[in-house]
Image: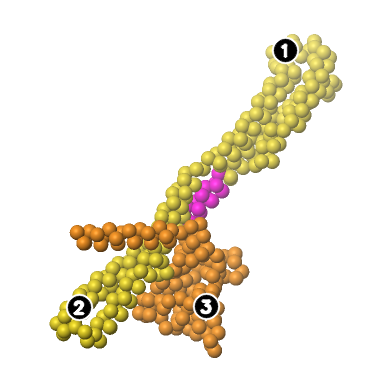
Chain colours: A yellow, B orange
Amino acid sequence: MESLLAIGQGRRPRFAVAALFAVALALSGTAAIAEDGSSTAGNATSPVEEFSQQLEAFQKSVPDLNKSIQDSAGTIDSVTDVEKARAEIDKLRETVSTLLGAVSDNGPVSQLGAKALDHVHDKLKRLAQETRFKPEERQYLLDQWRKLELETSSATKELDDARAQFAGLLQTLQTNEDFIGELLEIRQAEKALEVIRNLTHDIRDASTHLNKLIGGIKPPGA
Amino acid sequence: MWRLLGLAVSVAIVGAAIAACRPGDDVGYVEIKTVPVTPVTQTAFYLDSTKLAPIKKGSAILRQRVGILKLQADGFAGALAPLCDIVVKRNRITTVTVSVLERPPRCQCRYSGSDAARACVS
């Protein structure tokens, strides 16, 4: 695309057109003088007029072609919606990732939960062998620690659920991001195809005008 | 009163933990699933040279630095048996299912099409 733009914006085609125009004018001028009596009398357009019209059409088509190329490139660049969606998913992914980091198996919250549970188990084991307290006191303490064990286990299970939920969410975001990426690629491929088709059409038009222009150059006596 | 204080302390601890483990630019996740699912896996797994805690209920999600990790298991004569490579990407989760019935255990995962080494990818 850049090379096409460079060619479209370059000075050489303009120079060539100008040179062609000068040669054509010189030739047509000579031809007009030579055929002055015969051609100007009729109603049909003279070769000079015809040539001028074709040249005008061609010159008009060149900036249109440039504009077409630039517009097409701009269209591809302005495919921002999918990018925006992707950026939003990135942001969401980061948020979920942060939360997953806390509850992952080697994350700090999970490790705190495991430590807390280990501590409760350890305490229960030691209390079972404890001889300092009266049986009713020991039973009371054991009941309290068992209650704590249940609550800690329940909290740990909630942590497991949260872990599974965040992991699932992250995977969903990943899958959607991949899907958006694929959509973006399809969209860009379609745009590129459209650009190529339009350019081919415009170049063919310009070529037709140029052919007419060259065909309109009739040297004297031809 | 005590309950509120306890709640506030818990919130502060969890908040601090989340802030402390906030993933930087170079952190992703590895999910290891083992089949068949058992309360605790008997096979010891290693990510590179780090031994993992036994996997409970057939699943573990581990926070890891971005890069390529080698999943290994205890092999014969105390040597580590390499199972597969896992690609960890930023804020992404790479899932690997390990069949522990086979000897050595075998990885099942999504591979990158272009990677000759067939590393597991997210």
Q: Residues within 10 Å of mark 3 (few under 14, many from 20)?
A: many
Q: CA distance from mark 1 to mark 3?
A: 96 Å
The amino acid marked with disc number 1 is: Gly
Toward the viewer: B93 or A150? A150
Q: In this rendering, is residue A175 above or below A220?
A: below
Q: Which residues are magenta?
A: A178-191
The amino acid marked with disc number 2 is: Leu
Residue position marked by numbered label 1 in the rendering: A42
Q: Residue at x 46, y 76 (%)?
A: B52
Residue position marked by numbered label 3 in the rendering: B72
Q: In this rendering, is residue A33 above or below B72?
A: above
Q: Are marks 3 and 2 on the same chain?
A: no
Residue position marked by numbered label 2 in the rendering: A141
Please provide percent x and percent y for residue B8. 27, 58
The amino acid marked with disc number 3 is: Gln
Chain under callout 1: A
- The residue lying furthest to the front in this view is A132
- Of the 4 image quadrants, the one containing the C terminus of chain A is top right
Q: Secondary structure at mark 1?
A: loop
Q: In this rendering, is residue A51 above or below A145?
A: above
Q: Residue at x 46, y 52 (%)?
A: A90
| Magenta span includes A179 | yes
Chain under callout 2: A
Chain under callout 3: B
Toward the viewer: B2 or A81? B2
Please provide percent x and percent y for residue B53. 43, 76
Q: Is residue B106 visible?
A: no
Q: Secondary structure at mark 2?
A: helix
Toward the viewer: A197 or A134? A134
Decide which of tag 1 and tag 2 comes sooner along the chain: 1
